[in-house]
Each structure stands twice: as structure tokens, then as C-alpha cells.
Amino acid sequence: MKKYEIAVIPGDGIGKEVVPVSLKVLETVAEVHGGLKFEFQSFPWSSEYYIEHGKMMPEDGLKTLKNFESIFLGAIGNPALVPDHISLWGLLIKIRREFEQSINIRPAKYFKGLKSPLVNPNDFDLIVVRENSEGEYSEVGGRIHKGEDELAIQNAVFTKKGTERAMRYAFELAKKRRGHVTSATKSNGIFHSMPFWDEVFNVVKKEYQDVQTASYHIDALAAFFVTRPQIFDVIVASNLFGDILTDIGGAIMGSIGIAPAANINLNGKYPSMFEPVHGSAPDIVGKGIANPIGQIWTAKMMLDHFGEEELGKKLLDVIEDVTNDGIKTPDIGGTSSTEEVGDEICRRLKKAV
Ligand code: ATP
Ligand code: MG
């Protein structure tokens, strides 16, 4: 019996609605598999916790989380109670940084039963590997002079280690998929970092002779996401480029409520964290209509991370079938509730596996 210990942080808003539904789905996955067991331990760390305790999580919160296989997170943020910079930096960003989650991955695919804004959405299935710890989002730089002469200098930091790490992850992932990696560059306009990025890409790709590659400047690449996303399998991108591409990825699928994400720790010292792209959605809290697919697909990414890719694929197939048969929440044109979608996924999982 394989056992996975998972720390669960439902967090704020609809996180508390979609997480329980997703845990039910994971329990069903374990049940039908037979040789798998998930042990969930739930932590109430959230904006409400902050109001009561003056912090988003206890002092030894990270120490507690460190012992788990992974972290399954709903959403953090309740701007009416706690300013975003406190809630995000006090929990989400703290975990990402301290646990060296240096890669962010976000898939986007043509989803049956969803209305993509694309003219030709058929059959795209891609995943963006975003460098998550350095690059353009650096604190190096500053502002000098005052008045008319004032200026700001922003440096980007690309280490060989960090760049290689992201690229190797992309190639390893591509080997398990369709064997193609696209590099997002801008070496025709950015003088130092992007030629370096290209150089590292050209070295790393030599280690993966069986993987095909392409390299596009980010402007063209972003356009291709809209005009022909079918050409992509795995895309590796810097922190800023990846940030932009993953938002486009969510947009071309047709709804933010279904988009999943993972923050991956690569050195094995700390757990990885799985959280959907959407936030706490204060506008629909308590109505029972939050789309649980983003969170459930995120659970699927956690299964992949555990090496249970076959199970993950089955789960995604079931989610897509349920959506295609019209059992959908209102954000994607249906009339079903959060629970109804979750229950239907569980019911079909029992039949499918
Ligand atoms: P945060 O600061 O936590 O990211 P936000 O307001 O910026 O919050 P979201 O919480 O993602 O962003 O909400 C954006 C919009 O998408 C809202 O109108 C929300 O209701 C809708 N939305 C987000 N997630 C879902 C979901 N799972 N199901 C249905 N609608 C959703
Ligand atoms: Mg937001």
C-alpha cells in the first residue's frame, strides 16, 4: 500500500468550498485504485486565522509543513479583511520561497464542453514550465536622482543553475509527453540575459537528443498561443515570460475556474505545493457555484507528481467527460453546483477505473 501524507490548506473564500470536493475525489481515486492511501491533515491558515492570531500561520508553520509529501492549497486572499500583501507574503509566497519551489507549471488544453475564445481550439495540449525563483522579478536595482532626471533601474538575474534547472525539468517532462520543448526567448532585444538563456538552452538540449526543440521570441510565441497553440508541447520560460504565457493559457481554455498549477521543489528537501490558478473569488462565496475543476485538476497534477500518471490521466478524462456532458457550474455555462460536479466525477471514477 502506497501512502501519501498531504497537508491541506483550504485557505479563504471558495478555497473552502472546492478543496473538500477535491479531497472527496482524491479519496475516490484511492478507493478505486485499491493500493493507494492519502492521509490528509488540514490547517485553518487563512485571512480569518490572521484576524484571530495576527499572522497568517503559526511561527512553526513551515516546520510543520516540511514533513509532508506535498501541500494542497485552495486560495489565499480576502482583501476585505486583510490587505493582499499581508495574506500573500505571510503564507503563499513564504511557502514558495522557503521551500525552494523553483518551478511553476501550468497546463492548458482544449477542454471538451468548454467555450474557448479561439477560432480553432481543437486539440491543443500544452504545458508551461515557468522559472519561479529569479529572472526579471529581482530586487536588484533602484531609483536615482530626483525630479526631471529621476530614473529607475531594474536588473534581471539569471543564474546558470536556475536556468539549467528549469530547462532540464522541461526536457524531462517532454520525454513523458510528446517529446517537444519550445524555449521562450527575446535575444533579439534583450542584451545580456536572453542570449545567455539561449546559450544554456543549446547546451541542455544536447543532453536530450530524442527531444525536438524550437525557440521563439516571446512576442511571436505569445501570438502563436492564440493563432496555433497546437504546435506546442512543453514551453520553458523565464519568470516574467512564463507569467504572461500562463495567463494566456488560462484564457484560451475558456475559464479561470478550471486552470490548475503546481509549484515544484526540485531538490527534494521540501514539499511541492499544488494550487489552482484562480483566487478566493469573494463575489461568489457561499453560493455553492464555484467551479471545482481547477482544484480537482490541480489534484491530478499532484497525482502526476507522485508518479501516478496513469491515474491522473484517467481522472482528467473523467473531468472532461463530465464537462462535455453539460454537468457544469454557471461560470462555464451550466446550472450545476460545486458538489454536483464533484459527485458526478466521483460516480464516474468508480465506473471508469
Ligand atoms: P485573488 O486576489 O485571490 O487572486 P481575484 O479576485 O484576483 O482574487 P479570482 O478570485 O480568481 O481573482 O476571481 C476572478 C473572477 O473569476 C471572479 O469573478 C470570480 O468569481 C471568478 N472565478 C474565479 N475562480 C472561479 C471558480 N473556481 N469558479 C467560478 N468562478 C470563478
Ligand atoms: Mg488575483
Image (tube, rainbow, N blue to C red):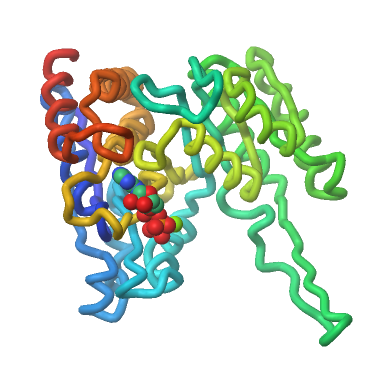
Residue 321, horizontal then vertical, whole percent: 27, 18
Q: Is residue 268 left or right of residue 235?
A: left
| Image: 139 above or below 73 | below
Q: Nearer the viewer, residue 85 or 168?
A: 85
Residue 12, horizontal then vertical, whole percent: 27, 60
Quadrant assignment for the N terminus: top left
Quadrant assignment for the C terminus: top left
Task: Quadrant for residue 18, please give it.
Answer: top left
Total marks in image: 0
Q: Is residue 336 left or right of residue 252?
A: left
Residue 292, horizontal then vertical, whole percent: 25, 39
Residue at 29% x, 35% y is: 293
Residue at 58% x, 30% y is: 170
Residue at 62% x, 18% y is: 231
Q: Specify the farthest residue to the bottom.
A: 146
Task: Quadrant for residue 214, please give it.
Answer: top right
Q: Nearer the viewer, residue 194 or 151?
A: 151
Residue 131 appears in the rendering: no
Residue at 72% x, 38% y is: 218
Residue 86 appears in the rendering: yes
| Image: 179 above or below 3 | above
Q: Nearer the viewer, residue 113 or 110?
A: 113
Q: Is residue 315 left or right of residue 217?
A: left
Task: Quadrant for residue 114, please give it.
Answer: top left
